Image (cartoon, helix red, strand yellow):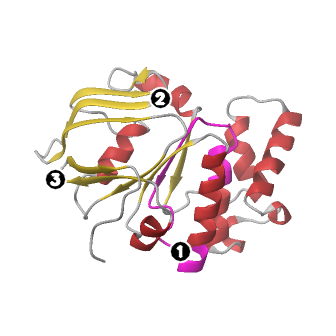
Amino acid sequence: MIEMQNVQKTYPNGVKAINGINVKINQGEFVYIVGPSGAGKSTFIKMMYREEKPTTGQILVNGINLAKLKNSKVPIFRRNLGVVFQDFKLLPKLTVYENVAFALEVIEEHPEKIKTRVMEVLDLVKLKHKVRSLPDELSGGEQQRISIARSIVNNPKVVIADEPTGNLDPETSWEIMDIFEEINKRGTTVLMATHNREIVNTIRKRVIAIENGKIVRDEVRGEYGYEG
């Protein structure tokens, strides 16, 4: 499903963010990416959805080598990928329904199928009653749930989440994690970068720890392993 082979990433300013990573993530896994600030987690995550390209090495996602993927092909690649951000990235002038439907409209899905699928995912995140609301009429937790609904409306094989509970209170964070667990139970691979020690230590999944651009720990049912 996801494989990195001898991946290195050096930015133009000389900073080596990723330094020789080899890792394989199988279909249906739930994986936390942890590590101290500046360890390389964000770069690791961004390379997975081709926001960044490796300097050397190969990254295979859904059988596609991202190191060789042309920029013009990136939007097509991302159709089979769901990405959830810390700051939601909803379109402020579109309703809840329109924000989620947009992901299907850009691939010219049939209108009836769009309506059915949008309502299915809004039901999953328990926000069918908010279809006509605008993002600024929602709480932070509700906005993140809409962001998740949008990320899975295409039935992606992989969902990548970058600090999805970072801006949320603890109770809301647990609600968001329930949704990610349900998505994973339905067969979707979930890859989540997080600083949330309590969540990682409570909902035990595979943990990949990154420090100084290298994987220093890879445990099947791991712990967070860092203070704070």
Against 219, residue 135 (above or below) is below
User: What residue is drawn where x is 60% and y is 55%?
Assistant: 181
Q: Which residue is disc 1 drawn over?
A: 168
Identity of the amino acid at label 1? Leu
Determine whether, in the image, residue 28 is placed left or right of residue 216.
right
Left or right: where does residue 97 sit relative to residue 67? right
Q: Earlier in the sequence, mark 1 or mark 3?
A: 1
Which residue does the numbered mark 2 point to in the structure image? 74
- 33 over 155 or under it: above or below: below
Residue 183: image location, x then y, percent: 64, 49
Which secondary structure, mark 3?
loop
Q: Is residue 91 visible?
A: no
CA neighbours of label 2 inside 10 A, class few (<14), some (14 to 19), many (20+): some
Q: Position of residue 184 (x, y in %)?
A: 60, 47
For the point 81% across and 65% down, which residue is it? Answer: 130
Q: Which region of the structure is painted magenta?
A: 148-172
Question: Pointer 3: what residue?
Answer: 212
Which amino acid lies under the numbered mark 3 shown in the image of this protein? Asn
Gap between marks 3 and 2, in whole Å? 28 Å
First of labels 1, 2 by sequence position: 2
Pick out the residue farthest to the front: 221
